[in-house]
Image (spheres, rainbow, N blue to C red):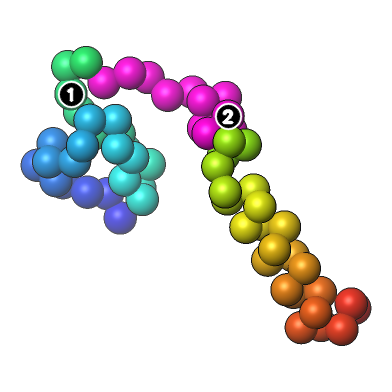
Amino acid sequence: MIAPADVLDTLNPGEVTTSGHVARTVNCPVRTANDVLRDLANDDLVELDVDLEATLLELTDGE
């Protein structure tokens, strides 16, 4: 679903909506795919992904 323009304007600068839109501001920096990957690599999400994989293996008895 595409958020209306007025909703995009109320987000924090640079915040991305679930539909992939970036909030509009004058000084909003452009975020590249490399920026996002760098943030993910420095975040706990990478560790969470490993924990999820281990949990799935346990639930399926390693199948």
Residue 39 picture location, percent across and down? 53, 34
Q: Give the range drawn in magenta.
A: 28-39
Q: Where is residue 41 in the image (x, y as percent from the top left)?
A: 62, 36
For residue 33, say whether it is visible: no
Which residue is rendered at x = 31% and y = 45% of the image? 17
- Residue under the point 26% across and 21% down: 28
Query: Is residue 39 placed above or below 43 in the rendered structure?
Result: above
Secondary structure beneath disc 1?
loop
* Gap in angstroms between the C-alphas marked 1 and 2: 23 Å
Residue density around tag 1, few if under 14, some if 14–19, many if 20 or more, within 10 Å: some
Q: Mark 2 points at which residue?
A: 38
Q: Residue furthest left?
A: 6
> Is 62 in front, or is 20?
62
The answer to whether residue 40 is left or right of residue 10 is: right
Which residue is at the front of the view, 40 or 26? 40
Looking at the rendered structure, the kind of residue marked 2 is: Arg
Location of residue 58 by image quarter: bottom right
Count residues near mark 2 (Cα–Cα under 10 Å), then give few for <14, some for 14-19, many for 20+: few
- Say which label, 1 or 2, has the lower sequence index: 1
Residue pointed to by mark 1: 25
- Element class at badge 2: helix
Q: Identify which amino acid the numbered label 1 is placed on.
A: Thr
From the viewer's perspective, tell me whether residue 37 is left or right of residue 12: right
